[in-house]
Amino acid sequence: MKHLTYTAIVFILFTRCGYELPTQYARIDETVRNIVFVYDNNGLAEGAPGDNVGVDAFFAGDNISNAKWSVSTGIVYGTILEKDSLIDSLNLVELMVPGSYRRSHGLTGDTVHFDIVIPENIIRKQFGGIASMSSLMPPGLDKNTTKALDSISPLEVIDILEMLCDNSGQFDPVAINSIVYSMFGDSTENAWRLLTFVLQALTVNMRFFVEVNGVHEVESIFSVRYNRKLKYLNRMITVNRNPGIYQVRINIIDQRKVRSGSEKGLDTTIVLSENRMNIIDIHEGCSYYLTVSIDGSIRDSGMEYNCNGQRGEEKYMSEWFYKNNSSIPNADKNKQFFIEKKIGSSQVRLFPPADTKMEEFCIWVVITDYFYGERLRPAGFATKAFSGRFRYSEEYKKKHR
């Protein structure tokens, strides 16, 4: 199944059931494999109509020989049993900034970069046939609360929002409050709460499609909403930034020292570097654990799309990929290194190869932010990739001949 499609399905099922997503793992074989799409709008993971957004698509495995791109600027969502339908299908060049497309190759795979301009009418196009704004509001809200929205259409609301977007700094606080209060027929702080619901209701998703090397199909979703352009209005309007990865480490624990209680041992920590070949010394009797540190200053908030409208901070999910890079004919995959999470523990463990002829490796980590309950919340991503070499002790070699 397509990697990102599978991830999206799992995400939907877990969010509807209220569970926290687990850490995930994937082994990269020779076939080309998508790692992640990262959307960057000056650090934001979202865009507004008219924005210029950078897209980086990371791939591992086989080198990219060709890529066929298309994009849809809107999605009509079906039920769990009914398929989503696309509003349109465009060639990527129709939205791409000329000259921005480039493909680069490195030790850990290929990266495709391009810049797109989000269509000015992308939100209007999806809501043109809807009569009242109140029909889009979350269920359970008191009817008196949304009464003013019964007689105003989404397009009329969009007119007001775009007027505010296009005139940042032109309205004083009194004028801004008057406009928002008039839209909702409410002159209290509740009007701003309703505005955050409106911004969620009017969020749309773009979907990117790429067929790589004629066989590998991938799709990715990007959220478009007015939040970035309207954040200046009120602190209740939130944006989502891409998370930041501070550091990735391998912690080496000498289990013999742990068992004996000795103060001596081989315990050490290796900080992985993206810019060099990382050397990992492998010793018999040692355990190896991967950890990733997140930049805690980049933690955003969200608001649930329901009558309670509870707010909270986003959470993070990690996903690890790994690849044995040594080219060994008829290699036994059961003797290659792999990564897994211990059941009932937050530890991510790296198991070195049992075949000591396997020396070179690649590791990728992807961090995704998420907040349960917010409608079509933009997903922020960060990724780092590392190449390295295992260096085996003589004791380990003797043990694994």
Image: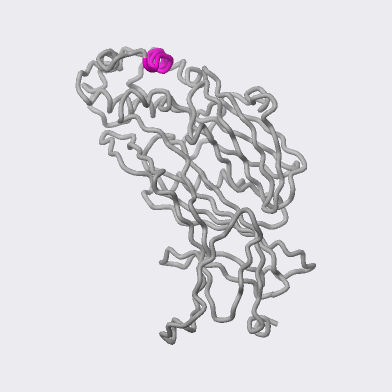
Residue 356: percent from left, percent from top: 69, 75
Residue at left offset 68%, top offset 68%: 333
Read off the magenta span.
158-169
Looking at the image, residue 331 sits to the left or right of residue 338; the answer is right
- Which quadrant holds residue 187? top left
Query: For residue 278: magenta?
Result: no
Residue 293 placement, left or right of 36: left
- Front position in the image: 313 or 132: 313
Residue 54 image point, x, y percent: 58, 33
Residue 207 spot, x, y in % from top left: 57, 33
Q: Position of residue 21 (x, y in %)?
A: 44, 53
Residue 350 placement, left or right of 243: right
Q: Is residue 163 magenta?
A: yes
Residue sitting farthest toward the bottom: 260
* Residue under the point 51% across and 43% down: 381
- Residue 97 visible at all: yes
> In this picture, is 271 found above or below 113?
below
Q: Is residue 101 above or below residue 276?
A: above
Quarter occupied by the C terminus:
bottom right
Residue 213 position (above or below residue 351): above
Q: Residue at x 55, y 54 (%)?
A: 365
Q: Residue at x 22, y 25 (%)?
A: 189
